[in-house]
Image (tube, grey):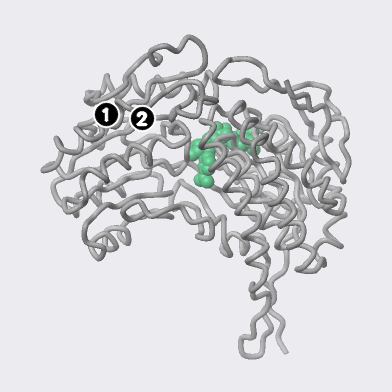
Amino acid sequence: MITRDAIYIGGKWVPASGGEKIEVINPATEEIVGTVPVGTEADVNDAILAARSAFASWSKSSIEERQGYLNAISAAISERGDEIAEVITSEVGTPINYSKMAMVGTPRVVARSYAKILDSFEWEEEVRNSLIVKEPIGVVGMITPWNFPLHQIIGKVAPALASGCTMVLKPSKEAPLNAFILADIIHDCGLPKGVFNLVSGHGSEIGKSISSHPEVDMVSFTGSTAAGVSVSKEASETVKRVTLELGGKSANIILDDADMAKAAKMSVYSCFNNSGQECSSLSRLLIPSTHREEIIEVISSTMERYSVGDPMDESIKCGPMVSESQQKSVSEYISKGISEGATVISGGLGTPEGVSRGFYVKPTVFADVTREMTIFREEIFGPVLSISTYETEEEAIIMANDSDYGLSGGVWSGDEKRAMRVAMAMRTGQVSINGGAFNISAPFGGYKLSGNGRELGSHGLEEFLEVKAIQR
Ligand code: NAD
């Protein structure tokens, strides 16, 4: 049981003014694993003022100083890696091996990548009679979700530090404990007081206070499209910059010249990572009707070996949903898939065999999913794969783009030129060809309802900068 009874403001741990607590539930056991304070509007105000007063000197800090802190944070994440992975598994239910690799490994390398980017980042350029300079935007409010909690936090904290911004972080209420470990790390690194502040609490209250606060220059938000819209509205009165990393319903197209066995098997993993609770999950699989039986056979046999259970067990691939409400929501989508006439290939309603507690669902694969069905259109955020067939490459592209979202995508083909042509036609922020690996230095972000702005790499750094033109 982890008890955190203070929030982090101005370089100190201080009690939250409200006195209430958030209980963090382990979704595999339904037991309370920790508590954090519920911050109030007054706490947010204090944190923002601390960030504002730290901005004057931090915005003038040297590149070497920023690199030193980024590398120190990366090293400390690495040193405390096993502890952080276990905490995240206990908050989110992520299978432990995946926690170690993605939940700890990715933020560790992202923090370091920003130190490296600063080696060669161009802060100034000459355009005719103008000197163009890039400057930190100011105080950044950061609002983050639970599904890749530390990765999403570092994806904002690292570029903000690199740019010379100061910040107030509000982590999710489902998985806040890892953010407190990060605050410990930052404190131990000796980052100047007020540069990083942490206030835990409810999005509907302190998230709103951050978004509407006149002393916040930018809000960097990751979460659902509905909450992102609310943040944009709250931020509009003060005309602050808002970057949004939102939901997805990404398509994975297997073309008729692909390595079918490999593409079909990998399509399961690219949908079900982190038990399907991934914004960039490739949850719509589009397959040529000529290869339907062959692909479904490979997917069915892959699913037979797809183990569900205790996320602390290293052999387990799929853990529980993060919360009871998420379990209910995913189950309702499975039920809709069945009632709207899709064919269940694997899984279905109910909990997996042998599971007596925890917020589990059965990893489920549907075939014969049509474009009108709810499971084709809405983000499920759970282990549910929808397979639809197409007749021509053109139809596959139309189906892929027939979505309100545009976050990620996949193409499988034996012909790289053809795969590239299809990737270029997809209205989405990322596309992976033949399973091309996630790149932490490439920009990540969405088209359409999937968001605004980009995270990671130098594009992610640019989001935290203002541009000034000085004419001579
Ligand atoms: P959520 O929108 O419920 O919560 C995200 C954060 O926003 C939390 O910290 C929450 O407290 C806060 N919040 C909620 N309402 C708010 C409001 N009105 N004003 C300000 N803050 C508010 O999302 P979630 O359930 O934590 O995460 C799942 C969603 O996040 C999915 O839709 C997923 O696709 C999306 N997501 C997107 C990305 C991306 O990079 N595009 C990454 C991860 C998750």
Q: What residue lies at 42% left-to-right and 20% top-to-bottom?
A: 361
Pick whichever, 71 or 136, lies toward us: 71
- Determine the CA span between mark 1 and mark 2: 8 Å
Pick whichever, 143 or 354, lies toward us: 354
Percent across and percent down for residue 272 are 40, 34
Looking at the picture, which amino acid does disc 2 mark? Val
Question: Which quadrant is the C terminus positioned in?
Answer: bottom right
- The numbered dot on residue 366 is 1
- The numbered dot on residue 384 is 2
Q: What residue lies at 69% left-to-right and 71% top-to-bottom?
A: 134
| Callout 1–callout 2 Cβ contact below 8 Å | yes
Task: Note whether residue 225 is visible.
Answer: no
* Quadrant housing residue 19: top right
Q: Is residue 208 left or right of residue 321?
A: right
Percent across and percent down for residue 4 are 79, 28
Q: Is residue 268 left or right of residue 379?
A: left
Looking at the picture, which amino acid does disc 1 mark? Phe
Percent across and percent down for residue 101 are 54, 42
Q: Is residue 411 above or below residue 202?
A: below
Q: Secondary structure at mark 2?
A: strand
